[in-house]
Amino acid sequence: MGVAAWATIFLICHAQQTVALPLTPFRYEAQAQRHCPGDTVVWLDFRRGRYYRKGQSRYARGFDGGFVCRNEARESGYRRSLLGLR
């Protein structure tokens, strides 16, 4: 096989491994808590790509966000915000 064929096989194999996990945003905190009873619910700001924990100043603020499970947010590539931690 040629180099192009090997490169194509390599890309296909690695592309399948980097599939993003599904993220389930909810409008209400209680809905998210029922979805993941053993996990912490966080507010995910889609525009900034950050999530906020309860007690932080931007928790549940803004129109470009939703409540999600912390582990789902982490696995989907979102990072925690240090803004407003006490």
Image: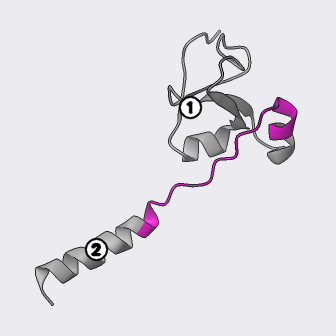
Q: Nearer the viewer, residue 58 or 38?
A: 58
| Residue under numbered circle 2 | 10
Q: Which amino acid does label 1 sit on?
A: Phe
The residue positioned 56% from the left and 47% from the top of the image is 75
Front position in the image: 43 or 82: 43
- Which secondary structure lies at badge 1? loop
- Residue at 82% of width from left, 31% of height from top? 28
Task: Indicate the position of residue 86 as horizontal and vertical percent values.
Answer: 65, 9
Kindly identify the residue that appears in the image at 29 percent across and 79 percent down.
Answer: 9
Q: Determine the CA span between mark 1 and mark 2.
A: 32 Å
Indicate the position of residue 21 as horizontal and vertical percent values: 58, 55
Q: Which class describes the residues within 10 Å of circle 1: few (<14), some (14-19), or many (20+)?
A: some
Q: What stretch is highlighted in magenta?
A: 16-32
Which numbered marker is on residue 46?
Answer: 1
Query: x and y percent of residue 19 in the render?
Result: 49, 60
- Residue 10 against residue 48 in the figure, above or below: below
**Residue 3 location, quadrant:** bottom left
